Image (cartoon, rainbow, N blue to C red):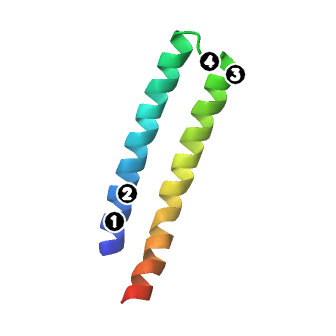
Amino acid sequence: MEVILTSVFSAIIIFITVFYMMKAFIIGYKRNQISLRKFIVFSTSSIVIGVIVASVLPFGYLKIFDYIY
């Protein structure tokens, strides 16, 4: 139960971070500070990394909680 709650709250924090990074990328693209190619690369890489980290978190937390208890 602790692993699920910890993973959910950590995933929420990660998704909020990725959401605000996307907003910053959109603002940078609209102001012509980054090119379309950089915007696409930054956006897809931040989304993919966020999903990978959020999906790996439960296994990491499970190992930590098994080590503690």
What residue is at 44 percent from the left and 25 percent from the top?
Answer: 23
The residue pinned by badge 4 equals 34
The residue pinned by badge 1 equals 6
Which residue is at the far front? 33
**Quadrant assignment for the N terminus:** bottom left
Question: Dot 2 lies on which element?
Answer: helix
The residue pinned by badge 3 equals 37
How far, Cα to Cα, is label 1 from label 2?
6 Å
- Report the amino acid beneath label 2: Ser
Which residue is at the far right? 37
How far, Cα to Cα, is label 1 from label 3?
36 Å
Q: Position of residue 9 (x, y in %)?
A: 32, 57
- N-terminal of the two: label 1 or label 3? 1
Tag 1–tag 2 contact (CB < 8 Å): yes
The residue pinned by badge 2 equals 10
- N-terminal of the two: label 3 or label 2? 2
Q: Residues within 10 Å of mark 3 (few under 14, many from 20)?
A: few
Mark 4 or 3, closer to the camera: 4
- Report the amino acid beneath label 3: Arg
**Quadrant assignment for the C terminus:** bottom left
Tag 1–tag 4 contact (CB < 8 Å): no
What residue is at 50 percent from the left and 71 percent from the top?
Answer: 59
Q: Is residue 28 left or right of residue 19?
A: right
How far, Cα to Cα, is label 4 from label 3?
8 Å
Q: Is residue 1 above or below residue 22?
A: below
- Report the amino acid beneath label 1: Thr
- Report the amino acid beneath label 4: Ile
Q: Position of residue 17 (x, y in %)?
A: 42, 41
